[in-house]
Image: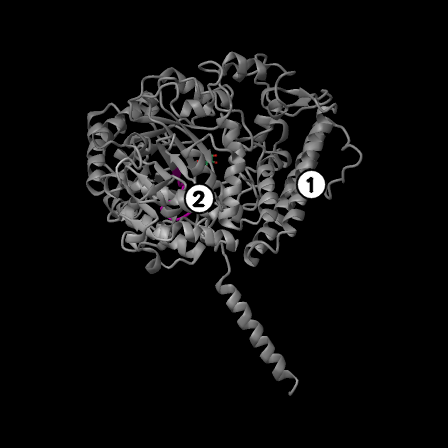
Amino acid sequence: MKAIIPLKRFAFFLGLLALSCNVYADNGYKLWLGYHAVADKKLAAQYVQQLRYLKFTAGSPTLNAAREELLVGLEGMLSLKPQDIEKPNYSTLFVGVSSSLNLPKNTIAQSEIQQTGKEGYLIRSVTINNKKCIVITAQTDIGILHGVFGFLKLLQTQQAIGVLNILEYPRIMYRVLDHWDNLNRTVERGYAGSSIWNWHKLPGYIDQRYIDYARASASVGINGSVVNNVNANALMLTPEYLEKVKALANTFRPYGIKVYLSVKFSSPIDIGGLKTSDPLDPQVIQWWKDKADEIYRGIPDFGGFLVKANSEGQPGPQAYKRSHADGANMLADALAPHNGIVMWRAFVYDNNVPYDRAKQAYNEFKPLDGQFKSNVIVQVKNGPIDFQPREPFHPLFGAMPNTPLMIEFQLTQEYLGFSTNLVYEAPLFKECLESDTYAMGKGSTVANIITGKFNPKLITGMAGVANIGSDVNWCGHPFAQANWYAFGRLAWNPAQSSATIAADWVKMTFTNQPAFVAPMQSIMLQSRENTVNYMTPLGLHHIMGVNTHYGPGPWVDNAGRADWNATYYHKADSAGIGFNRSSTGSNAAAQYQPPVRDMFENLTTCPDEYLLWFHHVRWDHKMRSGKTLWDDMVHHYYMGADSVKQMQRTWDKMAGYVDKEQFQTVKQLMAVQYDEAISWRNSCVLYFQTFANRPIPAGYQMPAHPLSYYRNRKYLQAPGIGGNQ
Ligand code: BDP
């Protein structure tokens, strides 16, 4: 007995210790807004010296939110207590809209302030009454909020703030998250728990998450949120749900985030009691007009509609022999008096159309160029198929010079390993944005097109399919938060580099210690290529599991529609593999401008990355590497899986730099990712081998199981299907 008591006490002590550790544990909820204390004491002291007293001209809900954020940030990073810092007579940090700041004349020229536009800001070192000061100013309240976040980022990433001259403004107007969230809280292609919107408890209950969602989104410049699935439920437009949407809009408003709704084209029939949803029918036109008026009565700054029409079974104008422009324009007319917009998706393809799916959106939409109302923006996925790990840029970019085109990226990693794979997507986004379409001559990059460089009259936008859910850490994988972050940063300014954004995110989320930042930045930058290698190297695409889209499924040949089969896309046979989209095949390459078309068309100039996207290539084709296609493909699959091992080794050395809980979360997820990478590698290599009829080259470890083992595995309950809406 005697011996047991001290042991018990020891256990009690340990328990207490564990508890106290847990209190401070980082579970990822705070995202990149944790405002960790500046560890470098010298730097912290300098910051305090430079910032000492604050004068914040607040008042409106937005300015109050900005002030609150600044105070929370300064307290977290520098232990400056709000009551100690706000001493207006001694101020060295001035924050407020230019018209109310009352700075001495000519401190900042009016012309400079004008450059900030409606949402941008200036952060400037100035001298006021012989004192060195910092001014954060803008023309609007929301500009101030962005400025505060911009300023906090300087401290979070430990920049010198002695001499500041920062002008920031967005290059894109509509920077929108698309939530594929259903009313029953399932999330189509969501891998981070259920929907964050609790429709049942709305409008009465405002979850703190809604506010933190708005804060985080605003911090990276996002200004819109489509709160429901593109496969829309018409109920969303009923008065009951509009009340709930209004509550969300009220919550987001201080953060400059407008609410949008996905609408079902057949709503006039589904909930309006009409017999048709023909966009030229006067009753239908009136129904939408009345509906828009009703929405704006409750939500005066409502953003507008997102529409998926005549796509994957969704209703649309074509049922009435009307065009996409007819459908979009009818909705646009209803929204125009209220300054709302229509985001009309170009993700259309039809199993009954006898030609290559990759060509269909272009063929459908290009002839409609110039026919859309000015408040319609056509939303085009980054590539012509469907958010694959790698696709060439969509040929519609540059092909519709008189139509606003909004690029759509997918943050939720439907085809990139869900939330178990660490894949930093900024390099994918940038690859597309920097692609030169040559549409208006050299330099007609996708980024230049979508920012309206060649036609400044057009409205501009970027959408990201959100990867946000009810998981404590929001995105399922701690590193998946970086995709939300990077999307916002790139929508604000597509010229920013993936590397800078990654480094900023790592510092803000975890720590500024260089021994952590550098290896994490390089892991992130490499991660997307790793995943391409173990899933779809050399231009392969759409070879994932059927329906769930989980795991490998290169053998899928019995899906509901031909163009959902993997075999439709890889076309492996005993001669070779790949989809011939050159002039001897589907000729999809011809949808690109001649310099791009010629590069893809020619086997010798087609980049390895897109080889099997555009060509059916013989197994013994000599690749740039000197290897045969078969050997090179095997090499990519093995290299991809090995790179996950490398990533695990690097992460294992990071235990000392991050919170224990975060460390363990990432460590476990990386182990899952490794298993999944091996599964992809083995499945694909063994399956394609049945066509190539060649051995796995010497030196590579043989797959642990026969092909039948991989083929027979079923993942019927994989997340993200959505289900009953
Ligand atoms: C596909 C998804 C499907 C979406 C569709 C879309 O598998 O769930 O509804 O995209 O973008 O990738 O509409």
Rendering coords of residue 16 (x, y %):
53, 72
* 466 vs 318, nearest the viewer: 466
Q: Which residue matches tag 1?
A: 642
User: Mark 2 packing: few (<14 Cα in 10 Å), some, or many (20+)?
Assistant: some
Residue 230 is at least partly visible in this image: no
Residue 348 in magenta stretch: no
Q: Which of the two labelled residues, at mark 1 and mark 2, occupies the earlier sequence position?
A: 2
Q: Secondary structure at mark 2?
A: loop
Rendering coords of residue 54 (x, y %):
33, 51
Q: Quadrant of residue 541?
A: top right
Q: Is residue 372 shown left or right of residue 412?
A: left
Cβ of mark 1 under 8 A from ligand 1: no
Q: Secondary structure at mark 1?
A: helix
Amino acid carrying label 2: it is: Ile
Q: Quadrant of residue 600?
A: top right
Write down the region rendered in magenta. 177-187
Which residue sits furthest right?
698
* 631 vs 495, nearest the viewer: 495
Q: Which residue matches tag 2?
A: 161
Rendering coords of residue 20 (x, y %):
51, 68
Q: Quadrant of the N terminus?
A: bottom right
Cβ of mark 2 under 8 A from ligand 1: no
Disc 1 versus disc 2: distance between alpha carbons? Answer: 42 Å
Q: Residue at x 61, y 32 (%)?
A: 536
Rendering coords of residue 193 (x, y %):
46, 50
Q: Residue at x 33, y 60 (%)?
A: 83
Number of disc labels: 2
Quarter, ligand 1 = top left
Amino acid carrying label 1: it is: Asp
